Amino acid sequence: MDFLTLAKKRCSVRQYQDKPVEQEKLDLILSAGRVAPTAANKQPQRIVVIQSAEGLEKLKKAANVYGAPLAMLVCADHQSSWKRPFDGKDAADIDATIVTTHMMLQAAELGLGSIWVCFFDPIVLRNEFSIPAEVEPINILGIGYAAGPVKAADRHEQERKPMSDFVLYESF
């Protein structure tokens, strides 16, 4: 399937089957994150794979992944991330987000549903998953087999702003 079709197919899933994600699919998803571009190729991402019942219970203390049987806690190591020399902008969160996007789209291509979660308590995550001080939790990606209907791929015609609302040519 071409990229735009894949991107339109992907939607947030908030109900999952009680079925684990196969290791082969998990490996492909992680590989997609591995090849994601990062600023200056610093690769500051650190991914905590959570799939055990115990791990998912710990995750519930900080975030809702809607019953996904697999979650990826995508973090960024600020000690290894690139910083823009002009103003010190740290690209760690951008890099982690690109990695998350690659994994999310790979999951969709494999027929899996996902939910991108940024509403979480970072202090609880830090404590529950022993995250060091220099590493920041950025995103959680819940993944699994969707239960129930998913959104139609053509929904974007109604749900998205027209490009004229956000695309500017040559100047703001």
Image (tube, rainbow, N blue to C red):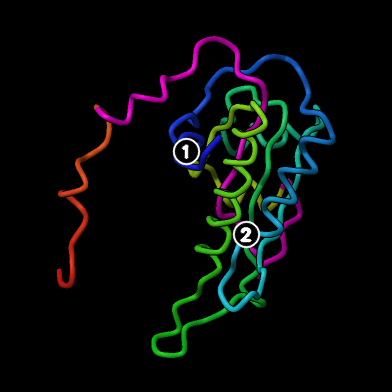
Give the x, y percent position of residue 161.
22, 40
Q: Few, some or many C-alpha atoms within 10 Å of disc 1 (few <14, some 14-19, many ≥20)?
A: some
**Residue type for callout 2:** Ala
Residue 163 horizontal/vertical position (percent): 21, 47
- Depth check: 8 or 99 in front? 8
Location of the N terminus by quadrant is top right
163 drawn magenta: no
Badge 2, how many Cα within 10 Å: few under 14, some, many 20+?
A: some
Q: Identify residue type, mark 1.
A: Ala
Q: Is residue 75 above or below residue 54?
A: below
The dot on residue 36 is 2
Q: Quadrant of residue 107?
A: top right
User: Could you tell whether 132 is left or right of 78 in the image?
Assistant: right
Is residue 53 placed above or below 44 in the rendered structure? Answer: above
Q: Which residues are magenta?
A: 128-157
Query: Mark 1 = which residue?
Result: 7
